[in-house]
Image (spheres, rainbow, N blue to C red):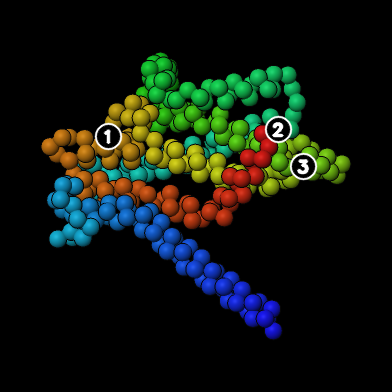
């Protein structure tokens, strides 16, 4: 009799502890959600505030208005839609070309054995250790000289900026993708070869569908880094109609006595929408792509 009472009390205690833990997790989730969303709400509040200043900014402005958003799309001196198009175009082109080059390089380093393989991999990683801003003078001179012979890929061109972006995205991403390729058993390659598949057919029909998660992860990393990049774009692009979003939006807060923080915040919120949409579309691939490639190197 006493043992059944003790068992009943322990079961009740376990249920109570589970409820307490559930309530704690819910409260923690609410706190973290508020912590994450508060800056976004603050920026949105500034975007509907016509004062254009962050001094005395409140979460709910006295006279909210959509004038800042209208200014973005109606002002011809600051062509925000064109800047957004330039950023999206460069980001998608860089992502596509970088993925093609990276996946081929990672597959070669993972599946083939050739002289100097390890040294090349180490050199690629070593180059990525040095940040891009250390190479600014050299990159500027290279594009200047290149523009003398090929004007379409020189300074103030999107093609020239695209070349710089491609050079900066291949190293670390090649290592990340190679780790994912290493996690795929080589038995699949051998089985495809036995069935009569060529090397390209094995890569295209067998291996490539299995590495889809890491393709999404690397693609997102490249897209976001290119979409939000400022320093290289500021140096290479000099024409206002060639600007990307990060460079163009800086014009609204560049002048000390002519800052328009409301317009800047409105543009920042609109600029964030493509990244959010892409994350929502491909989020189911992120966890697998980030973790699987980390177990082998």
Residue 204, picture quadrant: top right
- Give the residue number, with chain letter if any, for mark 1: 240
Q: Residues within 10 Å of mark 2 (few under 14, many from 20)?
A: many
Q: Residue furthest right?
A: 194
- Residue 164, image x, y percentages: 45, 27
- Give the residue number, with chain letter if any, for mark 3: 185
Q: Estimate the spatial distance between the alpha carbons at disc 1 and disc 3, rounded to whole Å.
A: 51 Å
Residue at 83% in and 40% down: 190
Judge depth for marks 1 and 2 and give the one in front.
Answer: 2
- Residue 219, image x, y percentages: 53, 42
Which is more N-terminal, label 2 or label 3? Answer: 2
Which is more N-terminal, label 2 or label 1? Answer: 2
Residue nearer the viewer, 294 or 99: 294
Residue nearer the viewer, 23 or 68: 23
* Disc 1 to disc 2: CB gap under 8 Å: no
Residue at 64% in and 41% down: 293
**Which quarter of the figure is the N terminus placed in?**
bottom right
**Which quarter of the figure is the C terminus placed in?**
top right
Check disc 1 and report its element: helix, strand or loop.
Answer: helix
Is residue 254 left or right of 212 when viewed as pictured?
left
Q: Residues within 10 Å of mark 1 (few under 14, many from 20)?
A: some
Residue at 74% in and 22% down: 114
Q: Which mark is residue 110?
A: 2
Q: Residues within 10 Å of mark 3 (few under 14, many from 20)?
A: few
Is residue 141 left or right of 206 when viewed as pictured?
left
Q: Is residue 268 above or below residue 127?
A: below
């Amino acid at each position: 009799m006493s043992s059944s009472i003790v068992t009943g009390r322990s079961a009740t205690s376990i249920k109570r502890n589970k409820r307490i833990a559930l309530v704690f997790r819910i409260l923690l989730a609410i706190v973290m959600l508020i912590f994450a969303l508060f800056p976004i709400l603050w920026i949105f509040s500034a975007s509907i505030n016509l004062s254009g200043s962050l001094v005395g900014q409140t979460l709910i402005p006295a006279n909210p208005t959509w004038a800042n958003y209208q200014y973005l799309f109606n002002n011809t001196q600051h062509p925000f839609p064109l800047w957004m198009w330039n950023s999206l175009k460069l980001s998608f082109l860089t992502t596509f070309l970088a993925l093609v080059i990276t996946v081929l390089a990672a597959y070669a380093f993972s599946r083939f054995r050739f002289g100097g393989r390890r040294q090349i991999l180490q050199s690629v990683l070593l180059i990525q250790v040095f940040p891009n801003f250390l190479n600014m003078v050299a990159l500027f001179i290279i594009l200047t000289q290149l523009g003398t012979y090929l004007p379409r890929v020189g300074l103030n061109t999107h093609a020239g900026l695209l070349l710089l972006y491609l050079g900066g995205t291949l190293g670390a991403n090649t290592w990340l993708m190679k780790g994912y390729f290493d996690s795929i058993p080589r038995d699949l390659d051998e089985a495809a070869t036995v069935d009569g598949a060529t090397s390209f057919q094995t890569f295209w029909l067998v291996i490539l569908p299995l590495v889809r998660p890491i393709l999404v992860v690397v693609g997102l990393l490249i897209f976001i880094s290119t979409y939000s990049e400022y320093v290289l774009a500021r140096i290479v692009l000099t024409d206002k109609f060639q600007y990307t979003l990060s460079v163009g939006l800086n014009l609204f807060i560049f002048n000390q006595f002519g800052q328009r923080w409301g317009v800047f915040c409105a543009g920042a919120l609109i600029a964030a929408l493509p990244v959010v949409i892409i994350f929502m579309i491909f989020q189911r691939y992120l966890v697998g792509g980030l973790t699987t490639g980390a177990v082998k190197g």
